[in-house]
Amino acid sequence: MEGLSLENTLWANTVLASPGYILGMIVHTGLETRMAMNISTPRQKVGALDLEVNWMAKVLFVVMCLVALAIIIADGFIG
């Protein structure tokens, strides 16, 4: 019988190279395990300048649409 150490530890999703069987036990499971913590979606890192540019681009798009609509309406009255 061997003691539990890193040399005889199989991590999650380990594939054995040779056919056979393994007698083992689960040591720790739950949300605090390394695998469970790495599954979560990463946070999106966006700087303040990027957020400001995105907001300004949206505002300018709406302004352009309003100006185009005003030009179309004015052309209808004049033409």
Image (cartoon, rainbow, N blue to C red):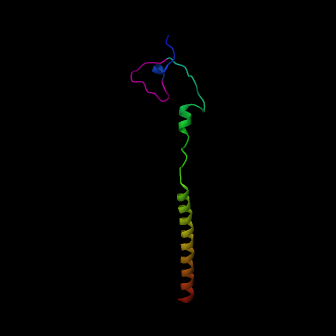
Q: Residue at x 55, y 19 (%)?
A: 25
Q: Quadrant of residue 71?
A: bottom right
The residue segment tinted magenta is: 10-22
The answer to which of 78 and 30 lies nearer the viewer is: 30
Q: Residue at x 43, y 18 (%)?
A: 20
Dominant secondary-structure state across the stretch colored magenta: loop
Label count reads 0
Q: Quadrant of residue 31?
A: top right
Q: Is 15 inside the magenta-drawn segment?
A: yes
Q: Given the current orientation, which residue lies at the most extreme top position?
A: 1
Indicate whether 18 appears above or below 77.
Answer: above
Q: Quadrant of residue 65?
A: bottom right
The answer to which of 44 and 39 lies nearer the viewer is: 44
Q: Position of residue 3 (x, y in %)?
A: 51, 14
Indicate whether 30 appears above or below 47.
Answer: above
Indicate whether 57 appears above or below 3.
Answer: below
Q: Given the current orientation, which residue lies at the most extreme left position?
A: 18
Q: Residue at x 48, y 30 (%)?
A: 13
Image position of 46 (left or right of 19): right
Q: Residue at x 42, y 24 (%)?
A: 16
Q: Position of residue 77 (x, y in %)?
A: 57, 87
Q: Position of residue 26 (x, y in %)?
A: 56, 22
Q: Is 4 inside the magenta-drawn segment?
A: no
